[in-house]
Amino acid sequence: MKKTNLKVVVVFYIALFISTIETIAQNVEKICNVTTVSMNKISKEWDGQWQGMTVGSDGNCYFASSTHSTAHGAGFHQYNPISKKHTVLAEDLTDVCGETNMNSQQGKIHSPVVECDGWLYFSTHLSNYWKAGIERYTGAHIVGYEIRTGKFRDFGVLRPRYSVYSAINVDPVRKKIYAFSAPFLDTLIKTDGCHLFSIDIATGKKEDLGQVTFKQKGASFWFYIDNNGNCWFTLWKMHEAYSNDYGNLYCYRPSTGKIETYKDVLPKGQLIDGTPITNEKMHQRRAWTWANALPGNKKCLFTMGAAGGGDERLWEFDPSKKIETGEAFTPIAPIGSTFLQVALGGDRLYFIQDANLQFERDSSAETMRDRDPDVIGYTESLHLRSVSILKNADHKITDHGKIVDQDGRAARMINSMTADDKGRVYMYGSWYVKSMKEASFQILFSDFPGQNIYKLMKRGEFFGVADFSKK
């Protein structure tokens, strides 16, 4: 072989080697290291969590753990990021609500946790979704927790037999809690609907501010209280279609005592690549699936995602601008589909998505988490991602990597998140387990008395924190 040919061959194989190394590197997933605490080592019946998490003014993370149990209610916890200490503040909210022997569990905290004057406020929620459980349910409680003293305050049942599904928030000026009351009992659904309520913090007085759905149940996940005390919200339509709601935005104004409806004003969706959503059914489903006020409460951020009409952008809402013309809505960044797993921390928005954005768009993590991994494979790959919310910043998405904990477990579903301004991101959800000692008992529903059974799932509930504060 001639020297020139040998040189060519050597250069070719060096280039091939470099290309192979680069391909291997691209195929190796980046890892987001998360420190977790097993919840099912405390209670086997905690089997999920939706919303119910915040960072308090003391810097600690406060979070809930929920059930679908006939015998055990929701838990409420504290995590100190400095000492790394986890504390169970209440193992069963049924006891806090004074219903220990009433055979009706307060099994979930499926609401935001909001703070005002050193108190955290949240709502319990129906967890026994089968017929007998719904018929026994006393109603959702509004509960306060004082950070300084560790004392709970039970405001009692918001409305007898109704749940709260699931939004609550606080007007810090008027010292009022707003809550979304929803029926689950058939007779209440057929004769009534969802209502907006307020609770005076000082007196505990509850006031019905108006009916929102008619002869239907419903849901509203988030309230935005603006700097004038107005309460803004949308209706979630994934499981309910409303003849009077096609992308509506609602506002209760304390100055008038009335709920106003802005019809068909929510932005029509488009995908992360700019492809417009043309499906009319998706247009009708438009709703906030996450919302958070910006400092000063003059504006808020929101997302909608596949479960809220298909839009895959982060938005800013400014109620001082024209709503009907769309001027009040400003797109900040394309981020892909999201649901409840979104959190604002300082000037960054954190969110969790499947590595495959199409899969994230088309699938339900809550359904997928119950597949047997020994049958379908250990395929879930949830990534923590973030983007700057600053308008003049580069809105390129940062992929922090696949969520894996200190023992090699990977997350299967996260529907509860919060973050602080130091770079700590907190999450709660279902993870693969290293042993069945960490696994959840999941109830299998049945409308036939005595036929509900528990199954030990091949997943467990874990609280976790990804700490970027020193990086």
Image: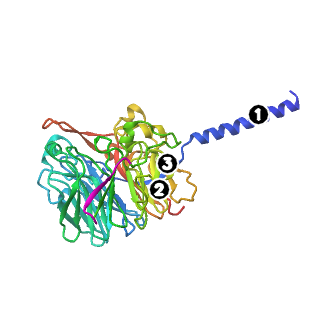
Q: Residue at x 21, y 66 (%)?
A: 153
Distance from disc 3 to disc 2, alpha carbons, whole Å, reads 10 Å
Residue type at mark 3 is Ile
Q: Residue furthest top?
A: 1
157 sits to left or right of 298: left
394 sits to left or right of 465: right
Task: Give the mark, 1 or 2, whose residue is nearer the N terminus.
Answer: 1
Image mark for residue 12: 1
Q: Where's residue 320, x and y in %?
A: 41, 62
Task: Give the mark, 3 or 2, whose residue is nearer the N terminus.
Answer: 3
Q: Where's residue 335, x and y in %?
A: 49, 48
Magenta part of the protein: which range?
A: 255-264
Residue type at mark 1 is Phe
**Mark 3–mark 2 contact, CB under 8 Å?**
yes
Q: Residue at x 38, y 52 (%)?
A: 290
Foreground: 146 or 171?
Answer: 171
- Per the image, the residue denoted by label 3 is 335
Q: Residue at x 35, y 35 (%)?
A: 371
11 sits to left or right of 196: right
Image mark for residue 349: 2
Foreground: 36 or 265?
Answer: 265
Say if 76 sits above or below 147 in the image.
Answer: above
Distance from disc 3 to disc 1, alpha carbons, whole Å, reads 40 Å
**Mark 3–mark 1 contact, CB under 8 Å?**
no
Task: Give the mark, 3 or 1, whose residue is nearer the N terminus.
Answer: 1
